[in-house]
Amino acid sequence: MADASWVSLVEHLVWPVAVIVLVLVLRRQIGKFLVAVGGRITHVSVMSVTVELAAATETRPPWQGLSERDARGLVPAQDISDSYFDTLRQALLAPGHADFFVVDLKSDGRHEWLSSRLYLFTYVLSRMKGVRVVVFTATRGDVARSFLGVAEPDCLMRALATTEPWLRGARLYTEAMQVGYLPQPTADGAANVAAPSEDTQPPVPGDIEEWWQETRANLLNPDPLNVPRQFLECIQSIQPVGAASPGPGWLELPSTADPNKTWEHASWITATDLIDGVLSHAVQPGQYVTDDRSWLPQQRVRAVAQSQGNFVALLGPNRRFERLIDRPALLEAAGAVTIDST
């Protein structure tokens, strides 16, 4: 009996001692792992060997300014960088990064996002906040933020510029303005660069990515809304009294006290554009997992890991978008911690 008690005691001590030895031996590797993914993984359970989901971070810019102006809609270029949008200005200047922002198209028949604003703020947020994906939602029946799909910023901008090339022209002109190369914009937003004379030395353009890096670090102290203003100046046109309207593809801004009309070269984005329109090749509707509240954590991890794409939307009942999962971060964690396969 004494021998049996001794054996039982040893068996109970072996596992805790083995765990302590393992932690001591692998303490450096474990430390590196936690530093690498500690900001992205919400929970790590060593004893049950499960990894909770790596949730992506969202930025929610305050699009609406004073006097019910909305930066996503028809607003004159000069108003964008005015005091109307101070809250948006401060949000862009605030330190920190984010992985995604949501483009909510609301309900059918409601105009929420202009193509020009989608292009512009996808560009600005990807540079200022490090946004790597755009999530599209809409209202379907009584369900708000119903998931439509996700898109990478560069793919989204390229798709928009394919149909509306003046958007890319306006961006290139605006970038040239930031780095000290000053072409003259044309009516369609393209850059019209005059050749330098023999008596003048052409300016040496800077690097736009370096400019954005310095802007993010607040080394330049610029107004982040100068870029949107300059961009919109390229695609907006003032129609003098008596002049002909610009024609198809232009939207008239709300009337003001100025007798001259202002037009913008843009269109309204609809859910149809994502399904079989201009954005159908850029927006991925299948990168999601419908969450099951009865799942164990490792089952949820497995479902996301087996999905496609870098980012996977986690949906609640009725396809309501709840959160976005950084799948590469999840797979990195899964490679470092064995996920229970049962």
Image (cartoon, rainbow, N blue to C red):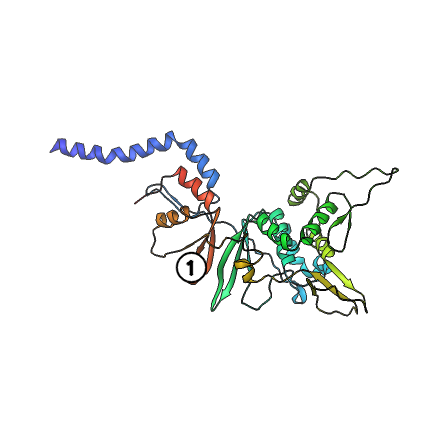
Residue at the image point whose x is 67% and y is 53% from the top: 167
For the view shown, which residue lies furthest in the right direction? 199
Q: Nearer the viewer, residue 11 or 166?
A: 166
SS for dot 1: loop
Q: Nearer the viewer, residue 22 or 189?
A: 189
Q: Quadrant of residue 166?
A: bottom right
Counting every numbered tag in the picture gives 1
Circle 1 residue: 316
Q: Quadrant of the C terminus?
A: top left
Residue at the image point whose x is 42% and y is 59% from the top: 316
Q: Type of residue at label 1?
A: Gly
Across and down, in percent, residue 107 comes to 53, 67
Residue at the image point whose x is 36% and y is 39% from the top: 338
Q: Nearer the viewer, residue 152 or 213?
A: 152
Q: Is residue 177 visible?
A: yes
Q: Quadrant of residue 41?
A: top left
Across and down, in percent, residue 130 comes to 58, 46
Q: Is residue 146 above or below residue 1?
A: below
Q: Is residue 223 visible?
A: no
Across and down, in percent, residue 113 comes to 61, 61
Q: Quadrant of the N terminus?
A: top left
Across and down, in percent, residue 21 comes to 33, 30
Q: Is residue 305 left or right of residue 124?
A: left
